[in-house]
Amino acid sequence: MVERRQIVELWRRGEACVLTTVIEVEGSSYRRPGARLLVAGSGDYAGTISGGCLEAEVVRKAAWKVRDGAVLERYSTMFDDTAEIPYGLGCGGVVDLLLEPVDTPECEALLLAIERSLSGEQRTVITWLPGEGKTLSRVILGEDGMPIFASRDLPEKKLLCARGLRPGQVYEGRFVEELLPPQRLIVFGAGDDARPLVAMAAMMGWQVTVADGRSQLARTERFPEAHSVVSLEAGKVHSLSIHAKDAAVVMTHSYEQDRSLLAMLLQIAPRYLGLLGARHRSSLLVSEAATMAGLPLETCCERIWAPVGLDLGGEGPEAIALAIIAEVQAACMGKRGSSRHLSVQDVARYVGEGGNERYLKRQCATDLAL
């Protein structure tokens, strides 16, 4: 997402001349299909298409390559010490690149779709690749599947067959990709330990919202990287419009607030719901929040990552933030890895060790533990 923003910024400066897109990869490659490099006439560029193997060559020849229109070029990243220019430096793959001039309706529509995706609007892009007498044509679909842009004189038959194709692949000369909005992360808790978490999430290009009932902490100047900072009134979680595709981390350090938040978030079931705190505290919270939400305990255990964060080792706010960010990334990309969930048996065992009195009376140092 950070790369997309850099590409849009360069485009809006009015200096861009060629857009390069990775279309297909054989073997090993640093970047996957959909990666982009936008080249300016000055030689500046935004984005990457390799691990540094191809950028200089593409930037140097981009304008010349598209002098007659969009082209599809193949580059080998295999190391070859007999070649005049060993692009690969050992990357070990073959990459097909689409180079297209920026000043065409098709490229302008694509760059606009990239810009709109950063604002939260999903787009699907189908590009009919150039070659053997065929010129590039493109269709861009909105989230409802309806065309937002279509190349001039594109046959109706092509428009119909553009729907239902799997993104990230080439189908009989058509490259399909999905431009998803930035991952949204809602951090419940505006304490000092939330600050490195918000900063790291912003570095990932995510859209971060910080929410806390303590107005003295929920201030924009404390979280300059956040998209928004909200002073959250009790019971107003739904005002944040949290959806199933969002990620949320509960870390207010207040037992009552965490319990109330969990009860509401469990009903929404975001794709990631992390709970900061020791196992005993987390087990009590899950047990009580499940009752408040009217949901089976087993369902709640499946929906909550607790203790929050991958087990990376280390201590302190920065180490905890790194562990949480890594786990959110893995969960949102469908990679469970070594993520941790409390089981029904875990909850029963920890609940049996004692009630929540210790957490209601005072803050416990172990609440900060993973």
Image (spheres, rainbow, N blue to C red):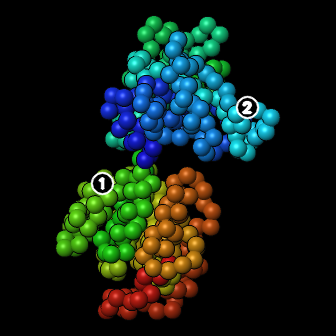
Q: What mark, if any, has residue 54 been given in the picture?
A: none
Measured in 3D between alpha carbons, the distance from the residue under mark 2 to the one under mark 1, in whole angstroms, is 48 Å
Task: Determine the residue positioned at 47% across, 56% down.
Answer: 271
The x, y position of residue 25, in whole percent, is: 67, 35
Asked whether, in this view, residue 222 is left or right of residue 281, the answer is left
Q: Which residue is mark 2?
A: 84
Q: Which residue is mark 1?
A: 227
Residue in the foreground of this view, choosing between 278 and 12 = 12
The x, y position of residue 202, in whole percent, is: 39, 56
Task: Determine the residue positioned at 44% across, 36% down.
Answer: 44
The x, y position of residue 262, in whole percent, is: 38, 69
Task: Determine the residue positioned at 35% across, 38% down.
Answer: 9
Q: Is 253 located above or below residue 223 in the figure? A: below
For residue 111, which quarter of the picture?
Answer: top left
Disc 2 residue type? Glu
Q: How many marks?
A: 2
Disc 1 residue type? His
Residue 51 visible in rendering: yes
Foreground label between 2 and 1: 2
